[in-house]
Image (cartoon, rainbow, N blue to C red):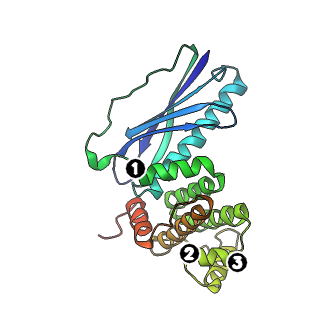
Amino acid sequence: MIDVVASVFQLSNARFRMAPKVDFRYLEQETGVRWHITAGGSRAYLLRFGAGIAQTDSDSIDKQNADSHFMMSGVRSALLLGGKGLFQTTAVGRLFLRSVQDDPDWSTQLDFLTTQHDVADDRTYGWMGAFSNHVMLRRAAADAHSALSHPHEAGTFVYRGFEWLVVGEGRSWDGLAADIGVSTADVREFKKLVNVDYGVRHASKSGLKLRADLHNYGTWVASLIDAISATRSRLQPGYKPEPPEMIAQAVAAAVPVDPYP
């Protein structure tokens, strides 16, 4: 017998963009549990198929809630790095179906856009697959998403995103500098900026705080995505790092304000 857990999320975008249509399948190799993610417009639907996963005790429900949020984080981050924009999500419902016979045929219509220009492409799906296989990439990309969502705290999230990559891959900060095409001194200056006297990651004696603005947090996030892309190229044979122009376009599509008024 197979169980199904269905989760529904609302998608929103500060620039009033609708999410492209996404249709993605994923297999948990350790458990054999399968996911089918369908999203578009203002909704995302996550279906999880497996034996005995739809139990309704509090521990099982808490685990399902966490799993769905982890997967939704990957979808948000894939849309960001895929150049589709910055989306926020809110869980609005979940359905537990137990002992479902055979393989359910699930489809959704609702407010999906049907124009070809707003359909997820190979770039977005590639990032979803990379996040499914490499946790540190998903964590770092989630911090890029958080940095754009909270511009006044962008330095904190960007720094932690870099740390996920440095620690996760066992590389040095010098190697990170090479990944993003800057000097070691530039990375050292950024670390000093967010760690010493500016109230970014740590409190300052003066009480003053550097508040990120469009001119610095956009550049910080672009550098983080550069590093994520370079790391993915070492973890995933055949993947080539995205050119800076493509990453800049993804960040420009995601910033909460129009950078070119």
Q: CA distance from mark 3 to mark 2?
A: 22 Å
At 66% from the left and 64% from the top, the residue drawn is 165
Secondary element under disc 2, as helix, strand or loop, is: helix
Q: Position of residue 98 (x, y in %)?
A: 59, 15
At 72% from the left and 76% from the top, the residue drawn is 205
Return the residue found at the far left. 115
Q: Which residue is mark 2?
A: 180
What mark, if any, has residue 196 been given in the picture?
3
Q: Which residue is mark 1?
A: 13
Q: Earlier in the sequence, mark 1 or mark 3?
A: 1
Of badges 1 and 2, nearer the viewer stands 2
Q: Earlier in the sequence, mark 3 or mark 2?
A: 2
Vertical placement of residue 170 versus 134, above or below: below
Tag 3: residue type? Val
Q: Position of residue 256 (x, y in %)?
A: 41, 59
The quarter in which the N terminus is drawn is top right
Q: How many C-alpha atoms fall within 10 Å of the one at disc 3: few (<14), some, or many (≥20)?
A: some
Q: Position of residue 19 (x, y in %)?
A: 37, 45
At 54% from the left and 48% from the top, the residue drawn is 129
